[in-house]
Image: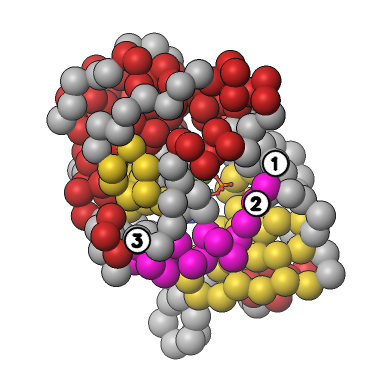
Amino acid sequence: MRTPTLACVPEGPVAVPDAVRRLAGDDAVTPVWRNVLGGLTFRISGPAAGSGQEAERFVKWVTAGTSGLDLDGEAERLAWAGAYVTVPTVLERGRDATGTWLATRALPGRSAVDPVWVARPAAAARAVGAGLRALHDALPVADCPFTWGAAERSARLSAAGRRDLGEVPAIDRLVVCHGDACAPNTLIDDDGTWSGHVDLAALGIADRWADLAVASMSLGWNYGDGYEAEFFDAYGITPDAERIAFYRRLFQLD
Ligand SMILES: Nc1ncnc2c1ncn2[C@@H]1O[C@H](COP(=O)(O)OP(=O)(O)O)[C@@H](O)[C@H]1O
Ligand SMILES: [Mg+2]
């Protein structure tokens, strides 16, 4: 079972891979995130003018041999989605014997789980809801080459998992889902408006409840109970208990 709450800002020293050092040149490297599978994200910041480099960029790093993290698939999805919504622009991707990396241009705003937003959970929950709605409204299903449907995800489960999951509910509305709409993957501007989305490795066509169920659940991990109503209201939808329960089960089993 997934325990996404464990994804967090790394505590203590983090070894910076050689490839990330090389990408940084003389600029500062700060570890900002470690996910449940051990993948790391670093922020690189340096002087903007005249350096020929972006002032701020992010590098996701996956150590060789780690399964379940697909930076190539993420880069493809970022390139596709970037034509319609604000997502990171890919600057470079590569691999060596020790791992793979994906460097992107920094988006404006702070993660919805930055301390600034954890201190204002109702506003953050609204921004996450409005941001998800805008993403679903903007991405065209007809042009999307990626899928994230419940049937295909369920087919990858064990027989026991499929039994626990139960029947896939009828589709409410097919959209291009984010694929991991947890709160940390929405960025929010200082005025409380969502400013972009990150972490699109699983983006694909699915019922919108696949994202709604997970995004609303993640609010509890990051802000505590009591913010789901704000989220659903900002998205503009009435919670559907049955589909929410199904897609949360699928997320946990997946
Ligand atoms: N291009 C970017 N601009 C701004 N912040 C970013 C960018 N890329 C990553 N981040 C920050 O790093 C965090 C981790 O990146 P993410 O892609 O979500 O990795 P993971 O797959 O490990 O969750 C994000 O929650 C966000 O705060
Ligand atoms: Mg993330």
Quadrant assignment, res 73 = bottom right
The answer to whether the residues at label 1 and label 3 have Cβ atoms under 8 Å apart is: no
**SS category of the residue bearing label 1:** loop
The amino acid on which the numbered mark 1 sits, given as a three-letter code, is Leu
Q: Nearer the viewer, mark 1 or mark 3?
A: 3
- Is 182 left, or right, of 189 in this rendering? right
Residue neighbourhood size for the residue with mark 2, other residues' Cα within 10 Å, grouped as few (<14), some (14–19), many (≥20): some
**Residue 37 circle label:** 1
Magenta segment: does it hold 79? yes
Magenta segment: does it hold 18? no
Q: Nearer the viewer, mark 2 or mark 3?
A: 3
Q: Residue at x 23, y 25 (%)?
A: 232
Q: Which residues are magenta?
A: 68-82
Q: Earlier in the sequence, mark 2 or mark 3?
A: 2
**SS category of the residue bearing label 2:** loop
The answer to whether the residues at label 1 and label 2 have Cβ atoms under 8 Å apart is: yes
Q: From this view, report whether residue 207 is shown above or below residue 63.
A: above
Q: Is residue 67 visible?
A: yes
**Residue 202 circle label:** none
**Is the distance from the Cβ of mark 2 to the nearest ligand 1 atom less than 8 Å?**
yes
Residue neighbourhood size for the residue with mark 3, other residues' Cα within 10 Å, grouped as few (<14), some (14–19), many (≥20): some
Q: Residue at x 39, y 12 (%)?
A: 225
**Residue 69 circle label:** 2
The amino acid on which the numbered mark 2 sits, given as a three-letter code, is Leu
**Is the distance from the Cβ of mark 1 to the nearest ligand 1 atom less than 8 Å?**
yes
